[in-house]
Amino acid sequence: MINPGKMKAAVLMAPDVLAVREVKTPKPGPAEVLVRVASCAICGSDLSLMAHPWPGQPPYGEFIPGHEYSGVIAALGETVDEFRVGDRVAVEAHYGCGRCRNCRRGNYTSCLNYGKREKGHRANGFTTNGGYAEYVVNHVNTVYPIPDSVGFEEASLITNLGCVLYGFETVGGFIVGDRVAVIGPGPLGLISVEVAKALCAGKVYLIGTRASRLQVGASLGADRLIDVNREDAVQIIREESGGIGADLVIESSGSAQGLQMAIAMTKRMGKILLLGFPEEPVAADFASLAKDNKSIFTVRGEGWGNVGRAVSLLASGRVDLKPLVTHSFPLEKIEEGFKTFRERIGGAVKVVVKPNEDIGKSAR
Amino acid sequence: MINPGKMKAAVLMAPDVLAVREVKTPKPGPAEVLVRVASCAICGSDLSLMAHPWPGQPPYGEFIPGHEYSGVIAALGETVDEFRVGDRVAVEAHYGCGRCRNCRRGNYTSCLNYGKREKGHRANGFTTNGGYAEYVVNHVNTVYPIPDSVGFEEASLITNLGCVLYGFETVGGFIVGDRVAVIGPGPLGLISVEVAKALCAGKVYLIGTRASRLQVGASLGADRLIDVNREDAVQIIREESGGIGADLVIESSGSAQGLQMAIAMTKRMGKILLLGFPEEPVAADFASLAKDNKSIFTVRGEGWGNVGRAVSLLASGRVDLKPLVTHSFPLEKIEEGFKTFRERIGGAVKVVVKPNEDIGKSAR
Amino acid sequence: MINPGKMKAAVLMAPDVLAVREVKTPKPGPAEVLVRVASCAICGSDLSLMAHPWPGQPPYGEFIPGHEYSGVIAALGETVDEFRVGDRVAVEAHYGCGRCRNCRRGNYTSCLNYGKREKGHRANGFTTNGGYAEYVVNHVNTVYPIPDSVGFEEASLITNLGCVLYGFETVGGFIVGDRVAVIGPGPLGLISVEVAKALCAGKVYLIGTRASRLQVGASLGADRLIDVNREDAVQIIREESGGIGADLVIESSGSAQGLQMAIAMTKRMGKILLLGFPEEPVAADFASLAKDNKSIFTVRGEGWGNVGRAVSLLASGRVDLKPLVTHSFPLEKIEEGFKTFRERIGGAVKVVVKPNEDIGKSAR
Amino acid sequence: MINPGKMKAAVLMAPDVLAVREVKTPKPGPAEVLVRVASCAICGSDLSLMAHPWPGQPPYGEFIPGHEYSGVIAALGETVDEFRVGDRVAVEAHYGCGRCRNCRRGNYTSCLNYGKREKGHRANGFTTNGGYAEYVVNHVNTVYPIPDSVGFEEASLITNLGCVLYGFETVGGFIVGDRVAVIGPGPLGLISVEVAKALCAGKVYLIGTRASRLQVGASLGADRLIDVNREDAVQIIREESGGIGADLVIESSGSAQGLQMAIAMTKRMGKILLLGFPEEPVAADFASLAKDNKSIFTVRGEGWGNVGRAVSLLASGRVDLKPLVTHSFPLEKIEEGFKTFRERIGGAVKVVVKPNEDIGKSAR
């Protein structure tokens, strides 16, 4: 039933305590739509914000997390003609205030009014309610139609792909022929391998410690796997490049070692993109960075409309997110889903939760 | 025989008169190599410079044209350790002086000392001798190793691919999901279709007047063919984009009509890349350009090392130049080759000349 | 009196017919402010849209033009804490819908929903009411505080400066030492001279036909004046640059001759910025453009927050707009103001209209 | 006497041992000039390479350091028509090989053949002989004419200005209205203050520990001095920017504290430029960097022809390097010059050595 006034949702009741409860179904404002959620993927940041509230997070007992989701348009705000009820869609999390200096320049994921609902900002699953629910409200800006060829499950991973694309655009894009090293075979690292290949990188290295994850990377197109427990990644890349190093290094392990390797293996005048980062300060060799004219770029979320580009990439088949979706749970079993993701049970990469199993099942 | 002191070459004796003669084999300077030519492709600019001398062109009776060639390293200058004799290579035409303001910034195809041999500039096949010969001297900067998987014939078309890549880089690269329109299904237009697809464009239009050429474009990946004799290209692209227009329009027809269509079909804030141009001034709608914040970019040659990227792209199989090589002639029959190219006999797209048929044959 | 329910405004009743009438004072929405107008400058585009309605223009009898104005905050929308009543402010015209692909990327002056009020777009003085009135409503995005050192009259010219800055940013900024040629000594051309000097251009040429206007340019910092009735601008710039040409040419005359000169005097690999344009198609030498790797950039309005940068530049004294304000009229005499501007009576450059003479007078 | 076969020069005989000796005067090659040195400034890197040899440094007993110098053209290589004997000139240190992938793209200060003389690379004062001598040979690429209004002493500091400009260009240029913080009031920091002001920064902070140096910064245009022994720089900048932070932070102290402050005071989506760096790895807050989408840029030398821009800036008077030249010594007293610089005797900022006192004196 569409929009019956009440819906089921996983509400954060206390640190690390999610409860599936019946709550009021939200109503879309003039420029918003109501999305009936097919699939909502668990992200590492969910673990973090469930343990300790992030800035702007709503209070316990009210907040519904989940920012990576897909679904079907269930209702339209009054000015919305960009969509029709029934449209299959994916979403992005960040909706900037539209009035700060960053939003004004298109940098809405770096909104300076982050968390200020009254200024218009919303980040579903962070500062406003998200996708571990039957329904969720999105501003039209954050909604992208997906073709029938893209399944809901992979579509719920699309912010990951959007984030990686935002990173590639941030470092200047146009990768044809470049030597790219990806450190850390987590979801963002694996997707980075795919995007580097899609953009015609000359050679893509995937560097990590877990053989099983490296193998996933191989199946997604990595040209050379380096297990740092057995090989010296910096030395290999130097040797294979005539001593020069990698044109672009993508650090997505979030470890001190990964960061240090990244700086060491980047070529003179090369670029480093951080998709992960250590929570605590770590020592880094800024002398190497500066002497060799290297630069470090970061990304916050999936900016500059790159979720739109991500839809195109999925639809073309040039990037495939399906292999990353290893597990699926109904909303009622969301706790089991989180446990599976956190403990990587059964080689879990990405775990999705399905609040409306009918659409979750019917579509691919 | 390698470097026997004499070689055969096609010398430009007078306007539009090429004579195959025996001339002295050139010797490489300290930073140069001698290339034994396997394949040299005929380019539209050859027709032009043979009809009327271009700036900096050597005198009749001395000048050997041909700037699109591949071959094998036959001898090394004294400081060259970047190559070994026997290496299979492709080349680019432009070697900047290295001392003008443009070269200093890496814009060597736009060298401000163009044609000044004494300042170090050379452009083989334009201002210095080129590839319609058994041997030719190249500065190491202009030589790129090619893997065995890339045949000599397609390798001799590599400056075309380098030029298109330079264009894509010039307009800012990163095409994922963009709507790209290519006007003019000549070699550069057809390669633009391939590159747009390789860079994950969302939809690629190929616009022209000749059905056979459009069909070549379809086989190379164009999503939508528009025969302007039968359809209104501007209207189609507007309609299919919700009235917005194309993100990037590549004009390679060199016609007034193509240029005018390009401006009309580009979206607000979109980009136009000129790979062709009308020789005479033509009327253009600058009001549309300015009111809609569109920009026009051009490229001169195959700059910024993009021939290196082109080699990578060919080696990966993501772009294929073989379908463009429709005819091949030995050096002795170069006049027949030019006639075939000029008159498009047998549906000719690119015609190659092979000064050394042994290597022309042995490799793919 | 602040916001008394009724106000005086110049309403466009028919083509080229403005009538000063009493109308309802508008009320600011939640994210909007009410501006009490001190000075509203007449722009060339006012002449055009008064003659023939522009896209999205409100009907005759309702529409108040005027998009270049300054004033004082008179009332605040409910979510506005960026301003206080009494703040002195300047404005920009364009407020994008915030939901199209261009706005999403920060390109709000090129909004794809231009003129669609229901989608959120507004362009005061074009598609919504403007500043030839005692009061006008602005979204907070389009309002910038000005320090006491900046007078209201020059502040009402700030979109001109914002537009020029947007142009300099569009072509890539960082002009230190560059050779810059400005064609057309109208307001945008004169301001371009000032900005080029402020950004440390090496030499700035001002090219035009009217000696008096050229002299204004000299007083604003132009290093070399070229009267095209007496000198050959292309030749002079070539000669003074060792044959190379100008790094950046800013065409603001809007004439065919200006455009043709611009292409001819730009150096190989140089840039052309169009701040003016001919309404009708004109012949241009695209062969020169393409052979010499030149590019053409345009700007639409004063994008990317450059009005904010303009305020800083005015406050610093590095750019001075006061010399451009040659005439001032009260709202009642707006017709005389337009006549003065149109016919350049008394050497008029910019003419301002002052709907509230008390603030128009009190501040500098 | 010009070029008499023998000249005096300061030769590095052993670690930290300079001896003024008579050596053979060098001869310029075909594309080189001989410079008669008027002034050669001591740089911090001189101290470092004299203590421990840098990569590619010539052996003790042969090597003449000194890379910041100015002088007069004394002789021309055979292909040089860019200069005439007697021209007053400044120089840059880096001359790339012109054949590696970085040089090919214009990134010659990051030459991948650094130190390989046989490949064409030279870096005077680092890998080839420098300016602590009566004469030195320079490739024409590295020589810039200076007008009479620019004195030799300040001209010998021009690589410092070129380096800072290269930094501003690297971070994207166009600083109008931006909030810029400079950490470390050494020569590069002080020049950064000047350049930020020249490019119309909105507000420039200078942050340091030594009151006297901060005062120099104030005289050069810093808007706000912050003595970190007495004030909290991060807090001040946050407060003055409404909690947002600085748009651009230039770290030139080379200290761990400076680096950490830089990351902390940069706004979300802001940029950090490293002009100094700690020799040893230091802990940095990459979580802050990544969460707030900040980027770190570095520069190596004075690339992209920015010494040419620096000459223009000096000639215009918009930047003044004379206040930085606090001490001057003849070549014979070079040891005393180094002592003065190292120990900052008499408040030394930059110390210059004058191998030819006649030209050192005659010109300003």
Image: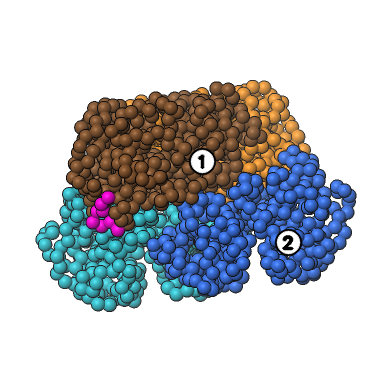
Chain colours: A orange, B cyan, C blue, D brown
Give the side of residue C8 with respect to residue D23, left or right: right
> Is residue A132 part of the magenta span, yes or no?
no
| Residue in the foreground of this view, choosing between B196 and C152 | C152
Q: Residue at x 50, y 30 (%)?
A: D213
Q: Quadrant of residue B152?
A: bottom left
Q: Which residue is mark 1?
A: D194
Q: Residues within 10 Å of mark 2 (few under 14, many from 20)?
A: some
D114 relative to C283, above or below: above
Give the side of residue B276 with respect to residue D134, left or right: right
| Residue in the foreground of this view, choosing between A235 and D308 | D308
Q: Which residue is mark 2?
A: C327
Q: Which quarter of the rendering shows the C terminus of chain A? A: top right
Q: Secondary structure at mark 2?
A: strand
Pinpoint the chain carrying mark 1. Answer: D
Q: Residue at x 40, y 56 (%)?
A: B166
Q: Residue at x 35, y 59 (%)?
A: B111
Give the side of residue B291 with respect to residue B279, left or right: right
Where residue A213 sits in the image (x, y, percent)?
A: 43, 32
Where residue A19 sits in the image (x, y, percent)?
A: 67, 26
Q: Main secondary structure of the magenta part?
A: loop
How many labels sit on residues? 2
Pinpoint the chain carrying mark 2. Answer: C
| Residue in the foreground of this view, choosing between B342 and A21 | B342
Q: Which residues are magenta?
A: D74-81
| Residue in the foreground of this view, choosing between B185 and C351 | C351
Q: In the rendered structure, which amino acid carries the disc numbered 2?
A: His
Q: Residue at x 74, y 57 (%)?
A: C40
Residue D26 at least partly seen: yes
